[in-house]
Amino acid sequence: RRTQPTPQDEMRAGMSYFHETIWKGVPKFLRRLDTALKNIGIDERVPYNAPLIQFSSWMGGDRDGNPRVTPEVTRDVCLLARMMA
């Protein structure tokens, strides 16, 4: 790599990880949870909108000694993350 990645580059790479792993893993986890609950006698499914898992990210917000991460960069990265989600 000839240049250091920008925070925006880091967000794109991070979101690709989400798309390749998380989007497949969460439904699998929820199916296993439903099965486990059923095995102990709870026949109700977990509601699809139940807040069981919360994801967050520091990408674009790492201002601890990184002069390239400005408030504008953080805003841009947050917008990029919303568009890619």
Image: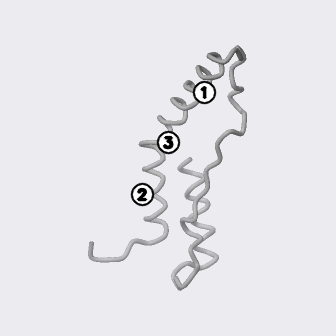
Question: Judging from the image, what secondary structure is the residue with disc 2 in?
Answer: helix
Q: How many neighbours does mark 1 have within 10 angstroms: few (below 14), some (14-19), or many (20 or more)?
A: some
Residue at 48%, 47% in the rendered image = 18
Compared across the picture, whether 25 is left or right of 79 comes to left
Question: Judging from the image, what secondary structure is the residue with disc 1 in?
Answer: helix
Identify the mark nearer the N-term, 3 or 2.
2
Q: CA distance from mark 1 to mark 3?
A: 16 Å
Tell me the residue that label 3 is attached to: 22
Q: CA distance from mark 3 to mark 2?
A: 14 Å
Tell me the residue that label 2 is attached to: 13
Identify the mark nearer the N-term, 2 or 1.
2
Residue 33 numbered mark, or none: 1
Q: How many neighbours does mark 2 have within 10 angstroms: few (below 14), some (14-19), or many (20 or more)?
A: few
Q: Which scheme is used to colour this image of the protein?
A: one colour
Residue at 69%, 20% in the rendered image = 45
Compared across the picture, whether 47 is left or right of 8 comes to right
On screen, residue 48 above or below 21: above
Compared across the picture, whether 73 is left or right of 3 comes to right
Q: Quadrant of the N terminus?
A: bottom left
Q: How many neighbours does mark 3 have within 10 angstroms: few (below 14), some (14-19), or many (20 or more)?
A: some
Q: Three-letter amino acid code at disc 3?
A: Ile
Q: CA distance from mark 2 to mark 1?
A: 29 Å
Q: Three-letter amino acid code at disc 1?
A: Leu
**Residue 59 drawn at (x, y percent):** 54, 65
